[in-house]
């Protein structure tokens, strides 16, 4: 239940049993004696921007089950120490500049797991009485925190495994040795003084350690190689250095990173990784996106023996496989060699490159080492019209071809996917597809999940698939016509379909699909935003349309969503329209022996 | 019963109609360059239903959702002719109606009613927050002051509309505006 912009000043009795009402934006102002005592079963309370100024004793008197309070952006003048005395299991507090009050209005029995203290309080220190026993996440995003002392971070270090988010703070000083704890995750993105920060957190452990920077914040993004030596005294598994300009990168830099399992070097403005990197035997994933590599071999990826995932998205140069070999064959050999060197490679993502010369290395190498490969080739302008482009990828299980265009928007009937007999997942969004031939996927006997959202289908038949378990058809096209096939229900009986954000035909001729959908509503993902386009009288109504036979109307929830379309006079006829369509369909349904329960649903 | 429902329905419609109008803002108005923008009319997101019980007793407007009618977003370009260069500085502010753990921008260039160019980019992605405000929550005040680098070499000349949509991790539109551009700047 969302109550927005209504200028509401009291809690309506009609929602007494609602567990998570949202009173957000421009409700209120509430009177000072206002409380939520009538909402006994309250679990989550969203009072974002509700003009609440005064919160007195016992604002939540009987709300013992209350777990989440979101009081973002209320100009609190006062919040009583015992305001939150009622809720005994508060877990999630998402606030902002009111934290000064909220932090002191706590109860030791709180089981707070998540505390978000957003925007501009200049405050890091938690009061000593603050319950940190169950704390999992402490979020100080954009708090204007510049200096951190050991005292400041005492409270979050009382428990280990906390996620501490200090992202977006202009931190220039951390007292040496302040952090000596085991953090689940430590986020210092945007920190202004890396050497200082590294001294401050030495002897700590952080599985993911975020040390990147933001675009356009005007700070010095350069990091020299010797600065990164400071990482030697910190135990880090995953290191994120995105957007930091790395200077003088050499093999020695990596000596302090030998325990890393994941390294994210997005856009460090490098042309190549230095030669001679060694000891990185634990590294499983490297992100080298948005760089200016000229050749794949510049990534030195052969130095990472355990690498399973390599991302080189958005390379600013035309990425060539490598040099030193004679043209086409040589490039093939390079890729083959690279894969042989990376025998455990299972995910190769080369999407969003400007000019990835895959045509030249087509067909794919007949490499057995790509046996368990998953390939991401999205937006790579692959020449898909080449029928054998996927030759040799018999064991490919996952194929991402999003944002690649098919000729005339038509998925060809030919042998494009014939080689991919092991594929279980096909990702084909934004491919401007208008139709798919009935036989295109029939060879893909293991295909279970297809993502076809953001395409332009005008007609779609599920007969194209044989063994499908889930399909995503959201935002495919307005006025799409779907013909459900008998294969819609897989053998084990569960099939997930996502038809959100489409305009579908709701006329009686589509009763098969509507009935199917209603009978399997539990398997429909996110039906929100799916509307009727036909017949005109039902245009704009939620899909599937509700068909309640005349005489048995239980006007429980007449959806009047997307009210932009109807003009005022038509509103008088809403019930009439609904009944009319219903009675028309009733006779059709009757002949199809559809259970009455379905009609009433 | 029907009449009451219809009356309430009209009330809802009128209420929504009243809240869908956004003013047109001027970003640049110079000899060779004019840029105006207006938040999309369908920015007001509304879902509503009327609930009536069997006896026809307790009519209540039980669900209604619309964006704050006062909410718009503010944008200015520090020095308009700079848009002829690759990077220029902007200031932008809004009150977030939705959280932006992830944020995606999609631009469509429309000339004479036809889309001739589309451009999309991830501003806040899982594992990669390019911008400082990534991760902000619903209700928070977003203010960005800094450079914008165009993904293209220069902005096209002529008269056209740039339809801009920002969506979040739930595919919900966080902000949406149509920019009217009349660009006759000289490029060197």
Image: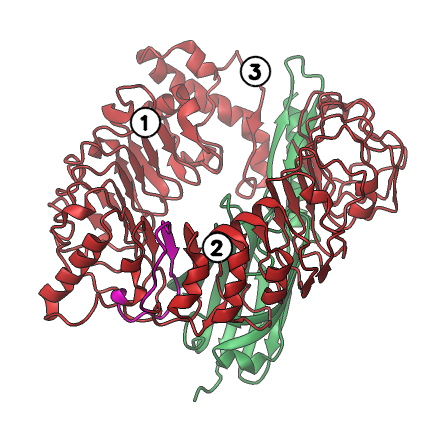
- Percent position of residue B135, x then y: 59, 51
User: Residue at 25% of width from left, 32% of height from top?
Assistant: A462
Labels in figure, total: 3
Pick whichever of labels 3 and 1 is earlier in the sequence.
1
Is residue A166 at least partly visible in the picture?
A: yes
Chain letter tied to green:
B
Kindly indicate the quadrant of the structure image that contains residue A436.
Answer: top left
In magenta, the rendered stretch is A275-297
User: Residue at 62% of width from left, 38% of height from top?
Assistant: A136
Mark 1 surroundings: few (<14), some (14-19) or many (≥20) residues within 10 A: few
* Disc 2, SS: strand
Give A371 or A549, whichever is nearer the viewer: A371
Seen in the image, is A136 located left or right of residue A475?
A: right
User: Residue at 70% of width from left, 33% of height from top?
Assistant: A133
Identify the residue under disc 1: A509
Identify the residue under disc 3: A554
For the N terminus of chain A, give its image quadrant: top right
Chain letter tied to red:
A
Give B79 or A309, whichever is nearer the viewer: A309
Seen in the image, is A548 located left or right of residue A485?
A: right
The chain that hosts pointer 2 is A
- Percent position of residue A81, x then y: 87, 36
Does residue A353 show up magenta in the picture? Answer: no
Foreground disc of the pair 2, 1: 2
């Amino acid at each position: 239940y969302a109550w927005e912009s209504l200028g509401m000043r009291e809690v309506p009795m009609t929602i007494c049993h609602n567990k998570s009402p949202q009173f957000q934006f421009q409700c209120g102002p509430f009177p000072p004696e206002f409380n939520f005592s009538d909402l006994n079963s309250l679990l989550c309370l969203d009072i974002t921007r509700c003009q609440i100024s005064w919160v007195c004793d016992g604002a939540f008197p009987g709300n013992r089950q209350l777990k989440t309070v979101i009081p973002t952006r209320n100009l609190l003048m006062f919040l009583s120490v015992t305001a939150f005395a009622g809720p005994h299991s508060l877990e999630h507090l998402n606030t902002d500049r009111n934290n000064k009050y909220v932090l002191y209005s706590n109860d030791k029995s709180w089981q707070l797991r998540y505390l978000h203290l957003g925007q501009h309080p200049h405050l890091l220190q938690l009061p000593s009485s603050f319950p940190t026993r169950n704390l999992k996440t402490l979020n100080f995003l954009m708090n204007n925190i510049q200096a951190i002392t050991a005292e400041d971070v005492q409270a979050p270090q009382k428990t280990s495994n906390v996620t501490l988010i200090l992202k977006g703070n202009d931190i220039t000083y951390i007292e040496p040795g302040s952090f000596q704890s085991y953090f689940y995750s430590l986020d210092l993105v945007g920190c202004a003084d890396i050497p200082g920060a590294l001294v401050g957190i030495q002897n700590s452990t952080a599985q993911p350690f975020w040390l990147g920077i933001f675009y356009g914040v005007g700070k010095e993004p350069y990091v020299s190689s010797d600065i990164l030596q400071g990482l030697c005294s910190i135990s880090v598994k995953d290191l994120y250095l995105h957007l930091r300009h790395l200077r003088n990168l050499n093999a020695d830099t990596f000596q302090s990173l030998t325990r890393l399992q994941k390294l994210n070097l997005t856009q460090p403005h490098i042309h190549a990784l230095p030669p001679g990197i060694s000891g990185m035997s634990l590294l499983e994933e490297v992100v080298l996106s948005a760089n200016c590599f000229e050749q794949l071999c510049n990534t030195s990826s052969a130095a990472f023996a355990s690498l399973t995932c390599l991302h080189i998205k958005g390379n600013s140069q035309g990425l060539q496989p490598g040099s030193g070999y004679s043209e086409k064959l040589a490039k093939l050999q390079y890729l083959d060699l690279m894969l042989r060197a990376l025998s455990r490679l299972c995910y190769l993502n080369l999407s969003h490159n400007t000019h990835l010369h895959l045509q030249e290395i087509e067909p794919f190498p007949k490499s057995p080492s790509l046996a368990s490969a998953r390939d991401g080739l999205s937006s790579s302008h692959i020449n898909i019209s080449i029928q054998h482009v996927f030759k040799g990828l018999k064991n490919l299980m996952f194929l991402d071809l999003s944002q690649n265009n098919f000729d005339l928007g038509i998925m060809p009937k030919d042998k494009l996917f014939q080689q991919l007999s092991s594929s279980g997942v096909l990702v084909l969004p934004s491919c401007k597809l208008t139709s798919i031939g009935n036989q295109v996927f029939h060879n893909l006997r293991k295909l279970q999940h297809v993502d076809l959202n953001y395409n332009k289908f005008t007609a779609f038949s599920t007969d194209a698939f044989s063994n499908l378990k889930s399909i995503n058809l959201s935002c495919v096209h307005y006025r799409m016509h779907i013909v459900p096939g008998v294969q819609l229900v897989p053998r084990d009986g569960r099939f997930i379909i996502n038809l959100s954000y489409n305009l579908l035909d709701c006329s009686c001729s589509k009763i098969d699909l509507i009935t199917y959908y209603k009978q399997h509503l539990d398997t429909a993902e996110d039906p929100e935003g799916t509307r009727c386009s036909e017949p005109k009288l039902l245009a704009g109504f939620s899909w599937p349309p509700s068909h309640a036979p005349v005489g048995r109307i239980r006007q429980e929830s007449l959806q009047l969503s997307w009210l932009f379309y109807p003009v005022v006079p038509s509103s008088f006829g809403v019930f009439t329209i609904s009944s009319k369509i219903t009675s028309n369909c009733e006779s059709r349904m009757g002949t199809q022996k559809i259970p009455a329960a379905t009609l009433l649903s | 019963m029907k009449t009451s429902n219809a009356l309430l329905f009209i009330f809802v419609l009128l209420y929504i109609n009243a809240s869908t109008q956004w003013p047109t803002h001027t970003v640049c108005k110079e000899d060779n360059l004019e840029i105006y923008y207006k938040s999309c009319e369908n920015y007001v997101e509304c879902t509503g239903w009327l609930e009536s019980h069997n006896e026809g007793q307790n009519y209540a407007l039980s669900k209604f959702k619309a964006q704050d009618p006062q909410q718009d977003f503010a944008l200015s370009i520090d020095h308009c002719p700079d848009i002829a260069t690759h990077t220029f500085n902007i200031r932008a502010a809004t009150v977030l109606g939705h959280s932006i753990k992830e944020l995606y921008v999609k631009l469509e260039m429309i000339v004479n009613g036809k889309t001739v160019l589309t451009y999309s980019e991830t501003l806040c992605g899982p594992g990669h927050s390019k911008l400082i405000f990534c991760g902000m929550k619903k209700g928070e005040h977003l203010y960005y002051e800094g450079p914008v680098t165009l993904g293209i070499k220069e902005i096209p000349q002529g008269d056209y509309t740039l339809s801009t949509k920002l969506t979040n991790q739930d595919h919900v539109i966080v902000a949406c505006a149509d920019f009217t551009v009349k660009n006759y700047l000289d490029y060197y």
